[in-house]
Amino acid sequence: MKKILILLMTTMLFLAACSLESPLKKDNEGKTNKKKSEVTIGVSVSTLNNPFFVSIKEGIEKEAKKQGMKVKVVDARDDSAKQTNDIEDLVQQQVDYLVINPTDSSAISSSVQSANNEGIPVITLDRSVDKGDVATFIASDNVEGGKMGGQFILDELSKNAKVAELEGVPGASATRERGKGFHEVADKSLDVIAKQSAKFDRAEGLNVTQNILQAHPEVEAIFSHNDEMALGAIEAIGDKDIIVVGFDGNEDAMKSIKDGKLDATVAQQPDKMGKASVESIIKLMDGKKLDKEIKIPLKLEKAK
C-alpha cells in the first residue's frame, strides 16, 4: 500500500512539474523552437471602451497578422478582478507570450507572477506593473507629457492661474506619472485649486467637472490625464472660457481641437505601441535582450 501511495505521489509531482514548463523551448543561443505561425500572443487590454486602447489592440493585431502570428484579445472593462481572471485564463491556455495593458499596476502583479511561474514572457503597455518580471515596458514618457500639459497652460495663462486636475484611475502608473509631471510645473507656477479622479472615463469627466466648477467657479484651466475625461469636461464647461488640455491624441480629441473646443492634447501613438510589442516578441524569439523600457515619442497637438 505504501509503495502504491509513493508511486502516486511521485506521478503527481512529475505531472505538476510538467505543467509548469514553459510552452516555449529555447536552444543554447536563447532562440525559441517555434515558427512565427505557431506562436499565440495573449493580449489583455484594460478597456476597449476607450479609442486609445482600441488603437493599441489594432496595432498589435496588424503587426501580428503581418508576421503570421495568432492573437487572443481579452477586454478587462476597467475591472482589475476581471483582468486578473482573464490573464489566468490566458496562462491556462498556454499562450506563448503575454502583452498586458494593466487596469491597476498593483492589482495585476499576481497575474504577472503567475505567468512568470509558467515561463511565459510578459510585456506591459502604457502602464507598468508593480511586481513581477517584465521583458519590457512600452509607453510614452508620461512624466514628460504631464510637464508638456502644465507648460502649455502656463504659456497660455499668467503665473498662478487657477487650475483643476482630472486624475485617472487610482493606482495606475499612468495616473501617477502624468500627475507627477504636471505638478513639476504646476506646483511652482500654477495654483491647483481642485483635483479629483474621473477614472479615465468621459461620463465621469463630465460629472466630476460639473462638481468642481460648482465648488470653484474661478477655475481658468483644466489638465486632464486623458482625452476621454477632457472631452467630458468640455461638455460640462459649455460656453465658459476655460482652457482644457487632454492626453492621448485620440481621434475624437483631434476632431475637438479642429472644431475649436479642446485646446490641446499631449498626443501619444498607441498604434506604434502595439506594433512595438510584437516587434519586441520577435526579438525575444531570436534570443535578443530588450531594454527594460521602450519610450514612444510624444507630441503636443493644439489648435493652429
Image (cartoon, grey):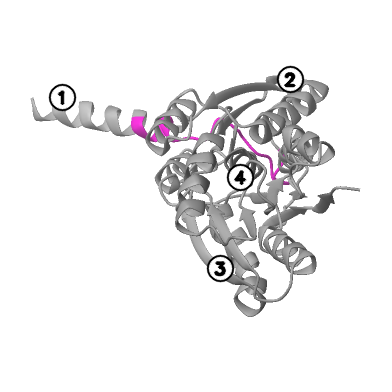
Closer to us: mark 3 or mark 2?
Answer: 3
Q: Quadrant of residue 117?
A: top left
Q: Is residue 85 left or right of residue 129?
A: left
Closer to us: mark 2 or mark 1?
Answer: 2
Q: Are marks 3 and 2 in contact (CB under 8 Å)?
A: no
Q: Is residue 116 above or below residue 72?
A: below
Q: Is residue 17 left or right of residue 54?
A: left
Label 4 residue SS: helix
Q: Which mark is residue 192?
A: 3
Closer to us: mark 3 or mark 1?
Answer: 3
Q: Residues within 10 Å of mark 3 (few under 14, many from 20)?
A: some
Q: Is residue 3 above or below residue 118?
A: above
Closer to us: mark 3 or mark 4?
Answer: 4
**Residue at 73% across, 20% down:** 37
- Asked whether residue 146 appears in the rendered view, the answer is yes
Amino acid type indicated by mark 3: Val
Q: Which mark is residue 4?
A: 1
Q: Residues within 10 Å of mark 4 (few under 14, many from 20)?
A: some
Q: Is residue 194 above or below residue 98?
A: below
The residues tagged by marks 4 and 2 sit, at their Cα atoms, a distance apart of 51 Å
The residues tagged by marks 3 and 1 sit, at their Cα atoms, a distance apart of 72 Å
Question: Secondary structure of the magenta portion, mostly?
Answer: loop
Q: Which mark is residue 166?
A: none
Q: Are marks 1 and 4 in contact (CB under 8 Å)?
A: no
The residue where tag 2 is placed is 37
**Residue at 73% across, 63% down:** 153
Q: Which residues are magenta?
A: 16-31
- Of label 1 and label 4, which has the lower sequence position? 1
Q: Residues within 10 Å of mark 2 (few under 14, many from 20)?
A: few
The residue where tag 4 is placed is 237
